[in-house]
Image: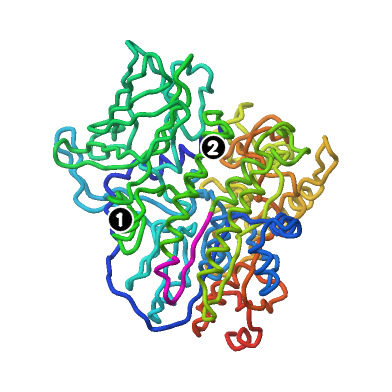
Amino acid sequence: MKGQNIIVSVVFFIIGLSFLTVVSGCGESKGSSEATTKKVLVLGFDGMDPKILKTLVDEGKLPNFEHLMKTGDFKPLTTSMPPQSPVAWANFITGMNPGGHGIFDFIHRDPATMIPYLSTSRTESADKTISIGSWIIPLSSGKVTLLREGRAFWEYLEEKDVPTTIFRVPANFPPADTKMPVYQLSGMGTPDIQGTYGTFSFYTNKPDEYSDEISGGKVFPIRVVGNSFQSKLPGPKNTLRKGSPETAADFTVYIDPENPVAKVVLDDQEIILKQGEWSDWVTVNYKIIPLLQSVSGIARFYLKEVRPNFKMYVSPVNIDPSAPALPISTPEDYSEELAREIGPFYTQGIPEDSKALSENVLDDGEYYEQSNIVLDEELKMFDRELKRFKSGLLFFYFGRTDQLAHMFWRTMDPNHPAYDPNSKYRRVIEQTYIDMDRVLGKALKSIDENTTLIVLSDHGFAPFYRAFNLNTWLKNEGYASLTDDTEGDFFQNVNWSKTRAYGAGFNGLYLNLYRREGKGIVQPWERDALLQEISEKLLKIRDPKTGEQVITRVYRAEEIYSGPFVKDAPDLIIGYNKGYRASWETVLGKFPKALIRDNDEKWSGDHLIEADLVPGVILSNKKIEADKPALTDLAPTILAEFGIPKGEGMVGNSVFAVLSAIKQN
């Protein structure tokens, strides 16, 4: 779990410091086009697994999926390697593999410094400033940059005046730059107001019940005096001040002396909560320059317990969609328009707070309730977009299938180390598929004979029983050397003069290559033989507890990727067996003592393994002619539906018409 905490810290380091000097720069354009009467509706269900889907269909629990399978088509969908959401959805968006779009993992590393960073976006402070007293005044704008390369398929649609809405697709923060009114709301990768993937706050007079190293959140000790206490809700760093101090919003909590009720007073807002109750969205203002500039966010409060101990959770402070501090939509006012119609909503890339559940700040029921709040908001937005969908393309994304499978796999799998046979939540994953079946039902009712419907997922799912420490294995085998016997962090204790290989990210293994890495020692002519040697050894690893093969496939980047960014890829991409995955610790350069350990955490299902073991799904109301459809086929497929040839560098073809695909080539 410390690894997760490190990831949050890295995100904060990279994004948070420059948050306040960023200027929302998305160009605004108005108007619409009715150049086509064709309609293509694409539903993206992150992590929907073909086996679970088929099982529930066979049991008669998903009537709308069953109808679509019988009247249209259904096949497994080849995912990306590695099958990680940013990589997979970038394949979908661009029609390219990672060599073309440059996203290889959640985490990349700077070969010069070995500092890890998030792969999909970069935030930079103003490069010109002046200092006046304690203030730092920017003379130029900061910027947020989408690191995904390659053109998104909707940029081709834009050129042909095809009306397009792209709703919360991952690997699209900030939204791709468009000139015509392509409506986009950013999804996975969108930070909270602190610039992290999500940092909750928790207030209690029993802080010793929680770990000192809470991942993805912070515990604030409180002292109740006279049935009230005061505290602060942290906000973004104030980069206009020397030292970039953290901003905070003051609030006071008054506890009812008799009833399990509390009142939160924040600015001029009063929020009264019963024990076990969630608040509506609360606007939080952070003062940057007194009387001149402030940044607003939104948060939800949850009163977990009043007595005997006081416990109150506050969600990560989300970017306020009605006054976004960072570019989260195109046109710029699209998020404001949505907020006006349906009210405030989660803008954080992954809104379900899995870290709060992992740290026991929220329990299973509370987390599930929070995820249902997210779903309610998404359904309101989905209904809205369906109503205004008259022509062109509508893509709508749901992350619920992914997040709840990650957190509740243990409740339905007796073989999982964290399995609880008495759990009340063993049918949560099943219910999630039923929820998505209702979404599909809405879609089926809304479409006409002129609409192509495509339903897809980026990958499937598998159990996460055992965590493998790749860097520890490299050390044990003599490929990595340390300066001391500690586990280290961020490769801080690596002796690079004696290290030939290291793991970074969830599936990446790099050589310490001369003139690529800052302290590289492996000569280019040694590369092939060393990669062959390591690959053969990795495939021979057996779990001493179970005897199972830990790694089933090892790929060289140049064998599976094509395009201008292959040079930036890991040298080897590791395909773990079902039940296994890279540990949280090894992802960011740590060297734990044990080679493999049981995963007894609530994060119990996963997909960061060999791609063939976790295919996604594709369904359509049209016949799918491709024998083995892949994510990279979807961009050419959507373009072909509008009579547009596939773009330069796209490696796939339309899944519907083999003849069309031949013509496209």
Whole-percent x and y of residue 403?
57, 46
Of 646 and 164, nearer the camera is 164
Based on the picture, tell me whether residue 309 belongs to the magenta stretch.
Answer: no
Residue at 83 percent across and 36 percent down: it is: 544
| Residue 54 appears in view | yes
Q: Which amino acid does label 2 sit on?
A: Tyr
How many marks on residues?
2
Q: What residue type is labelled 1?
A: Glu
Q: Is 389 placed left or right of 585 in the picture?
A: left
Residue at 63 percent across and 46 percent down: it is: 405
Q: In which quarter of the image is residue 144?
A: bottom left
Whether pointer 1 and pointer 2 mark residues with C-beta atoms closer than 8 Å, the reply is no
| Residue 194 appears in view | no
Whole-percent x and y of residue 631?
61, 67
**Label placed on residue 367:** 2
Q: Distance between the residues labelled 1 and 2?
A: 27 Å
Q: Is mark 2 on a helix, strand or loop?
A: helix
Q: Is mark 1 on a helix, strand or loop?
A: helix
Of 518 and 644, nearer the camera is 644
